[in-house]
Amino acid sequence: MRSLLITSIGITLLLAICTFDDFLCLHDIRADYVSKSVLAYLHIETTEPLPEWTDTKLEWTSISISFVVRSILILANLLVLVLLVKQFRATRSAAFGQK
């Protein structure tokens, strides 16, 4: 049961890191993101192509990877919690002599 608890804590810490990374990426996107659709919405036309950094590709990639990792970690944490409940019930039943 102890190893399952430690695993669950580790997964939760990784989820917190993903959340922090998402915040930083979204903050950077908010500051730097410029696209043709944004400029068209603002009725701004440019004669020069936009610099590549304005696409914030690294940030969007990080958010996409974080989504996949977060989804896997949430499912793994759910499995660990189900195992913990089963083990807790088995331990409780054994302690009280129940089936």
Image: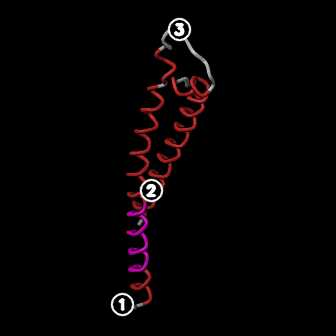
- Looking at the rendering, in which quadrant would you find the C terminus? bottom left
Seen at 51% across and 23% down, the residue is 36
Residue 99 — which label?
1
Picture quadrant where residue 28 is located: top right
Q: Give the amino acid at mark 2.
A: Ile
Residue type at mark 3: give it.
Answer: Thr
Point out the image quarter for the N terminus.
bottom left
**Quick check: is 80 in the magenta stretch?**
yes
Residue 55, placed above or below residue 46: below
Question: Foreground residue, 44 or 28?
Answer: 44
Q: Position of residue 86 (x, y in %)?
A: 39, 75
As drawn, which residue projects farthest toward the bottom? 98
Labelled pair 3, 1 in contact (Cβ < 8 Å) = no
**Residue type marked 1:** Lys
Residue at label 2?
A: 6
Give the residue drawn at x 43%, y 66%: 81
Choose between 82 and 87: the one closer to the eye: 82
| Callouts 2 and 1 close, C-beta under 8 Å | no
Where disc 3 sits, the SS reads loop
- Magenta stretch prevailing secondary structure: helix
Near-viewer residue (53 or 91):
53
Residue in the foreground of this view, choosing between 96 and 33: 33
Mark 3, other Cα within 10 Å: few <14 / some 14–19 / many ≥20: few
- Determine which quarter of the picture holds residue 98: bottom left
Q: Secondary structure at mark 1?
A: loop
Residue assigned mark 3:
47
The span shown in magenta is: 78-91
Foreground label between 3 and 2: 3
* Residue 78 percent coordinates (x, y): 42, 62
